[in-house]
Amino acid sequence: MKPVKNKKQLIAERKARYLRIITALESSGFSTVQSQIGDSLYPKVSQGGVGGWKAGRTTPSPDHMTQIALMTNCSFEWLWTGRGAQTLDNAPTSATELISKLLETLSLEEKASFLKKMK
């Protein structure tokens, strides 16, 4: 069984996730201005919401992460966990395909956490 993450580890993980989002957006030519990141997603995310991602207080929903992965042709697994290749050779053509590929790569604990957030 994996040890439970403490608050500092959780915040560091969330900040790293945000940095991967910024990397993906920059490499795809998208704006990294917080208000424009939020406006490009559906439902929209406030500038404060994106600021929460940056500070590590919150993390994007799996739906928003899926949208970012599709927009930037990045691997959802890489965006969410930092594992695997950043970009996809055979990019998924739908959110369903993207999520299916992600679920194949996650441990049971990670799948449970991901699916809980999807509810």
Image (tube, helix red, strand yellow):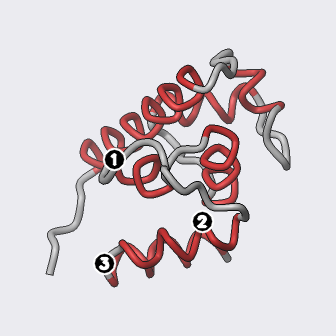
Mark 3 vs mark 2, CA separation in Å = 17 Å
The disc placed on residue 107 is 3
Crowd tier of the residue under label 2, counting other residues whose Cα lies within 10 Å: few below 14, some 14–19, many 20 or above: some
Taking the spot 67% from the left edge, 49% from the top edge, the residue there is 70
Taking the spot 47% from the left edge, 76% from the top edge, the residue there is 103
Task: Report the residue marked by disc 1.
Answer: 82
Q: What residue type is labelled 3?
A: Ser
Looking at marks 1 and 2 on the same chain, the residue that comes earlier in the sequence is marked by 1
| Rendering coords of residue 75 (x, y %) | 48, 51
User: Eyeballing the image, is 94 above or below 30?
Assistant: below
| Rendering coords of residue 50 (x, y %) | 64, 32
Mark 1 vs mark 2, CA separation in Å = 16 Å
User: Eyeballing the image, is 26 above or below 58?
Assistant: above
Q: In which quarter of the image is the C terminus?
A: bottom right
Instruction: Determine the image quadrant of residue 68.
Output: top right
Q: Is mark 2 on a helix, strand or loop?
A: helix
Q: Which of 51 and 44 is in front in this view?
A: 44
Looking at marks 3 and 2 on the same chain, the residue that comes earlier in the sequence is marked by 2
| Rendering coords of residue 32 (x, y %) | 63, 18
Q: Which amino acid does label 2 sit on?
A: Leu
Q: Quadrant of the N terminus?
A: bottom left
| Rendering coords of residue 111 (x, y %) | 43, 78
The disc placed on residue 98 is 2
Taking the spot 32% from the left edge, 53% from the top edge, the residue there is 84
